[in-house]
Image: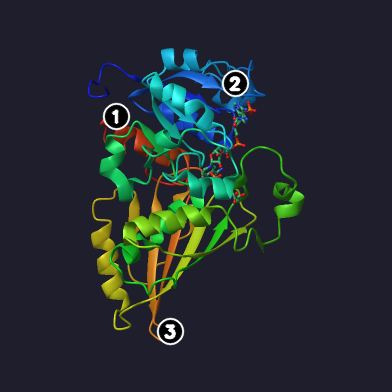
Amino acid sequence: MGDSASEKVSVGIVGASGYGGVQLVRLLLEHPQAEIAYIGGNSSAGKRFAELYPHVGGHLSLTVEAIDLDAIAQRCQVVFLSLPNGLACEMAPTLIERGCKVLDLSADYRFNDLGVYQAWYRVARRDQSLAATAVYGLPELYRDRIRTAQLVGCPGCYPTASLLAIAPLIKQGLAQPDSLIIDAKSGTSGGGRTAKTHLLLAEADNSLAAYSVARHRHTPEIETICSDLAGHDVLVQFTPHLVPMVRGILATAYATMRDPGLVRDDLLTIYAAFYRSAPWVTVLPNGTYPQTKWAWGTNRCYLGVEVDPRTGRVIVMAAIDNLMKGQAAQAIQCFNLMLGFDESLGLPRLSFYP
Ligand SMILES: NC(=O)C1=CN([C@@H]2O[C@H](COP(=O)(O)OP(=O)(O)OC[C@H]3O[C@@H](n4cnc5c(N)ncnc54)[C@H](OP(=O)(O)O)[C@@H]3O)[C@@H](O)[C@H]2O)C=CC1
Ligand SMILES: CC(=O)N[C@@H](CCC(=O)OP(=O)(O)O)C(=O)O
């Protein structure tokens, strides 16, 4: 599937009316090898997509349909599930059984061990054996496994930025165990399109605050992947903040180095080598630190690396667009790998800065 340039891959998007869904629509309409065959939802079912998003009118003539897994499986080779947590696990087993490839943008398939998922998400599940087969959709760390996966659990937005910032440190044992602190900031679109009081302009604008301190559900996701990379259990201190902007995440990670003799140039060499085959990660040169605006509308992650010789700490900053590398565009990157396409096919390269 996907090797022939003549036949496009038929794709479905469940949750097309949400922020992740509309990004998927935008990206898949521009993708040379994909054809949107189905869009599904709940409260938006029965509405033409152009009614929901007039700016897309003229590009997609489909109507949002109520969920019918048989119909989806008949019409789609690949299905993107962009739904609140706890719904994909009700749909993916049937879709997989019917032969579809599935990319889930929620947290349902990010954990192979459902014990961890259930402790943090409180969703009763019956699909442990399927969850155990899911591949974590961070191509920079699991590219080869994604290529052969039938089910991909796409990462959360904060874990994407955080893991790209710290993976070289963890994988190579450069940080002292459990010295990792991640301070992250997100724009409000990270909370989705469904109305929530704290995301109102009057609440979020001109204000800055941390939330879910010491209990955000992305903590176990970051720790699980770090533990896999390190080969032993890793704990991280993760604190998210809501900032008055629409898109973007900036994650700043701090760790005490095992070898206090390492300087910034050493770290930059290590980071450049780690990401040398990663087309969507840019390690910035000496003394350049990333801005979220550079990543807007793209699948790119910008990394800035610094060392403080007084404290012996390494400080790494990662900037992404939460709706793109943090969600929909990264799912397309995984789709490309699963279908045997170039990893970057159909993905916009430059931001619409400023
Ligand atoms: N926003 C972000 O930056 C990121 C989000 N994610 C994750 O991606 C997923 C989607 O997020 P996002 O796009 O922001 O969410 P939104 O709230 O914007 O959209 C949610 C979508 O789910 C649909 N939906 C809700 N309930 C049902 C149901 N019972 N049956 C069918 N469809 C349903 C809605 O359809 P309708 O309108 O028809 O009711 C809507 O299309 C979530 O799991 C989120 O945690 C992951 C990374 C980043
Ligand atoms: C700003 C904001 O509210 N962000 C969301 C993260 C969105 C996300 O990636 O959540 P999932 O892991 O459920 O997919 C939050 O902190 O809950």
**Residue that appears at 38% across and 59% down:** 227
Q: Please indicate whether residue 213 sits to the left or right of residue 24 in the image.
A: right
The earlier-in-sequence mark between 1 and 2 is: 2
**Residue under numbered circle 2:** 50
Residue 294 shows up from this direction:
no
Q: Residue 308: where, in percent of width, then height?
A: 41, 80
- Asked if the residues shown at circle 3 and circle 2 are in contact, with their CB atoms under 8 angstroms apart, the answer is no
Alpha carbon distance from label 3 to label 2: 55 Å
Helix, strand or loop at mark 2 = helix
- Asked if the residues shown at circle 1 and circle 2 are in contact, with their CB atoms under 8 angstroms apart, the answer is no
**Residue under numbered circle 1:** 339
Q: Amino acid at mark 3?
A: Thr
Q: Specify the quadrant of the image occupied by residue 143.
A: top left
Residue 123 shows up from this direction:
yes
Q: Please indicate whether residue 247 sits to the left or right of residue 210 in the image.
A: left
**Residue that appears at 50% across and 39% down:** 108
Q: Specify the quadrant of the image occupied by residue 206.
A: bottom right
Q: Please indicate whether residue 33 sits to the left or right of residue 203 in the image.
A: left
**Residue under numbered circle 3:** 311
